[in-house]
Image (cartoon, rainbow, N blue to C red):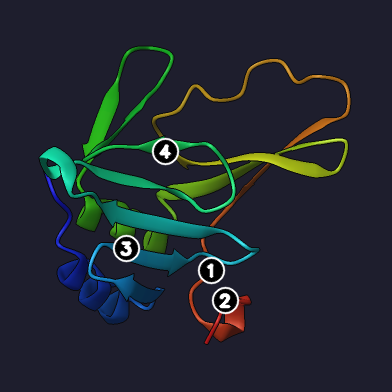
Amino acid sequence: MRYDLDLLREFCAEIGLDAKARDDRLLEVFLGGGAVLCFQNFDRDGDCLIGFTDVPWHGHGNLTFNDARGYHVELDPLDLLSGLRSGDVLVCERQLKGTLVDRWLVHKLYNDEFGELEPGERIIVRRACCGEADGCRG
């Protein structure tokens, strides 16, 4: 599977998410608070990746969100972006002693992300911002 980066960029513009194509293989979507979600196509075997620029979390193709009861939802890239805009998909950030150590996406209804926290650990769950009024790049 390959992402249609032009379609994703145009869709971001339509729904009010700030996005920029770095080249013909990489689209960055700015979600505020330093969170830059990247859609990237690779030359090898049509592989693609979605992830944040500054942490190890990533996925390939469509994203599936699960809850503890076994229910799930699978979102293609357009549904994912729409969910970020509507607040159905949220940005999670894990801090340890005040330092960002991971960032990932979570669905507000389908998640089992929040187990026991380590001493000094903090989980921040927030909506993606849209535009300068929310603190995103303009």
The amino acid type of the residue labelled 1 equals Cys
Q: Which residue is mark 4?
A: 58
- Measuring 18% from the left and 49% from the top, which residue is drawn there? 43
Question: Which element carries disc 2, helix, strand or loop?
Answer: loop
Question: Dot 2: few (<14), some (14–19), or many (≥20) neighbours within 10 Å?
Answer: some
Q: Contact (CB < 8 A) between labels 2 and 1? A: yes
> x%, y% of residue 116?
71, 15
Alpha carbons under labels 3 and 4: distance apart: 14 Å
Of 1 and 103, the residue lying toward us: 1
Q: Which residue is mark 1?
A: 129
Alpha carbons under labels 1 and 4: distance apart: 20 Å
The quarter of the picture where residue 134 lies is: bottom right
- Measuring 40% from the left and 66% from the top, which residue is drawn there? 28
Alpha carbons under labels 1 and 3: distance apart: 21 Å
Query: Which of the numbered marks, if any, corresponds to residue 26?
Result: 3
Query: Which of the numbered marks, if any, corresponds to residue 111?
Result: none
Q: In front: mark 3 or mark 4? A: 3
Of 118 and 112, the residue lying toward us: 118
The amino acid type of the residue labelled 3 equals Leu
Q: In front: mark 2 or mark 1? A: 2
109 on left or right of 92: left
55 on left or right of 101: left
Q: In front: mark 3 or mark 2? A: 3
Question: Dot 3: few (<14), some (14–19), or many (≥20) neighbours within 10 Å?
Answer: some
Alpha carbons under labels 4 and 2: distance apart: 22 Å
> x%, y% of residue 24?
22, 69
Q: Which residue is mark 2?
A: 136
54 on left or right of 58: right
> x%, y% of residue 12?
30, 73
